[in-house]
Image (cartoon, rainbow, N blue to C red):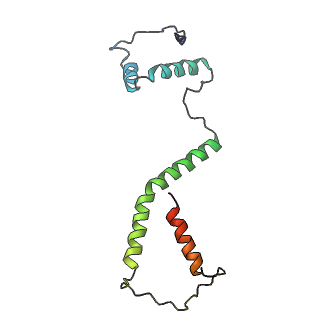
Amino acid sequence: MPRKKKSKRGFKLIAFKAYYDTDQDILDWWEGIEEGERSDEMRDLIREQLGVRRQPKRGEIIDLPDLMEVRRDTLWIKDALNEMPAYLERVIQDVAANIQPVAVGQYQSRASPVEAQTDDPALTDAETQRRTRRMKRATW
């Protein structure tokens, strides 16, 4: 199926001449505007001279206080996430530097040893064997 062509906006080209000898100030201003922004700049100037309120440009950020707060928060979160790896690396290095080495098979002594209290009774030999058989039959 042929696609419908997107209709283009109609326009009228408005042009004028600027002379190097008498209009150098205008030419300098024109060259100072980034290409692609020149038409918008001219429209803004003409509307300003006519006293017509400027229309917001497409893709322009709307100046709403709540939207600006969301933008600031989003940028803060982005910066925090970008700094996270370096921060975690510093924390890990600090922890590694402050840990005292312990020999294998040796435990650090605690001031008050905590006894493990469980409500579950230990498995009987029969239950242990039954579980072992079930594990062997299980397919993963």
User: In this view of the protein, which residue sits in the foreground, 124 or 33?
Assistant: 124
66 shown above or below 133: above
Residue at horizontal 40%, vertical 79%?
Answer: 98
x and y, in percent, of residue 63 in the image: 61, 37
140 shown above or below 31: below
In this rendering, position of residue 43 left or right of residue 103:
right
10 shown above or below 99: above
x and y, in percent, of residue 28 in the image: 37, 23
Residue at horizontal 55%, vertical 26%?
Answer: 58
Residue at horizontal 37%, vertical 76%?
Answer: 97
Residue placed farthest to the bottom in the image? 111
In this rendering, position of residue 35 left or right of residue 45:
left
The quarter of the picture where residue 95 lies is bottom left
User: In this view of the protein, which residue sits in the foreground, 44 or 4?
Assistant: 4
x and y, in percent, of residue 119 in the image: 66, 81
x and y, in percent, of residue 131 in the image: 56, 71
The quarter of the picture where residue 128 lies is bottom right
User: In this view of the protein, which residue sits in the foreground, 135 or 19?
Assistant: 135
Q: Tag count in the figure? A: 0
Residue at horizontal 52%, vertical 71%?
Answer: 132
